[in-house]
Image (tube, grey):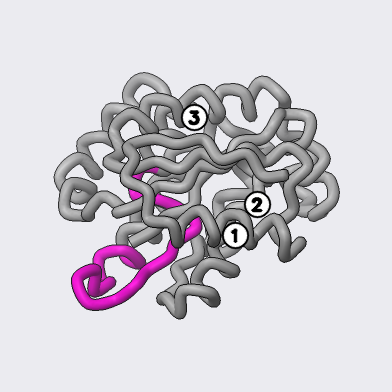
């Protein structure tokens, strides 16, 4: 069970798709575009943060709970920890308390991944990627919001069993050479708790 995680626009889905094809694994993609509150959240984060985060949490849980982790290879472009990261940034006070009360028992039923791949890129590169992919509701995401997300991932990385951090500066997994370096590393079967991979 492999998850590919990282900040907005870092390239999670591209790597997850290519890994699932290569490994002949079941692919699980986040259905963010179906969230009816997401575009409203980017316009008015105060009023729409809670429904946005609850929708995401339940959708992720519904996808992950039905997977057969013992008999299948699985690659996902998000982890069950993602809701904790974004709710911690976007919710405050009573909304955060309500979110935690609803989700605390449910999220414990999901397994940790065997490998947590974290993609890290500079904020300027994330902003450029977001601009390039052209989703209208993302275009006004601030640097400070992206920095908050980047920082929030650090505690999650410490809680995982096996973490591969890939530095994404000038990396594009559509380039076969870049993707091959990831595959070559994984196939060596190194025993590590955390490793940083620099793609050349």
Of pointers 3 and 1, the one earlier in the residue sequence = 1
Q: Is residue 190 positioned above or below 60 on the image?
A: above
- Give residue 15's mark: 1
Q: Going by the image, does 173 lie left or right of 118?
A: right
Horizontal and vertical percent position of residue 112? 26, 50
Chain part drawn in magenta: 62-81
SS state under label 1: helix
**Magenta part mainly helix, strand or loop?**
loop
The circle drawn on residue 112 is none
Give above or below for 153 relative to 103.
Answer: above
> What residue is at 66 percent from the left and 20 percent from the top?
144
Q: Are marks 1 and 2 in contact (CB under 8 Å)?
A: yes
Question: Which residue is pictured at 76% across the width and 61% down the height?
Answer: 175
Return the residue at label 3: 90
Q: Secondary structure at mark 3?
A: helix
Residue placed under numbered mark 2 in the picture: 11
């Amino acid at each position: 069970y492999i998850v590919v995680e990282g900040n907005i626009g870092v390239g999670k889905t591209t790597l997850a798709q290519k890994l699932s094809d290569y490994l002949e694994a079941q692919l699980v993609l986040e259905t963010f575009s179906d969230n009816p509150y997401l575009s409203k959240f980017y316009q008015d984060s105060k009023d729409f943060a809670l429904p946005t985060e609850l929708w995401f949490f339940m959708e992720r849980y519904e996808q992950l709970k039905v997977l057969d982790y013992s008999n299948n290879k699985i690659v996902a472009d998000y982890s069950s920890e993602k809701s904790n990261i974004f709710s911690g940034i976007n919710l405050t006070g009573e909304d955060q308390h309500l979110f935690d009360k609803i989700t605390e028992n449910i999220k414990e039923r999901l397994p940790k991944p065997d490998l947590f791949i974290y993609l890290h890129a500079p904020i300027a590169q994330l902003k450029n990627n977001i601009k390039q992919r052209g989703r209208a509701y993302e275009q006004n995401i601030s640097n400070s919001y992206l920095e908050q997300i980047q920082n929030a991932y650090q505690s999650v990385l410490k809680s995982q069993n096996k973490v591969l951090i890939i530095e994404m500066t000038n990396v594009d997994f559509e380039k076969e050479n870049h993707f091959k370096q990831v595959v070559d590393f994984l196939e060596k079967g190194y025993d590590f708790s955390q490793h940083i991979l620099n793609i050349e």
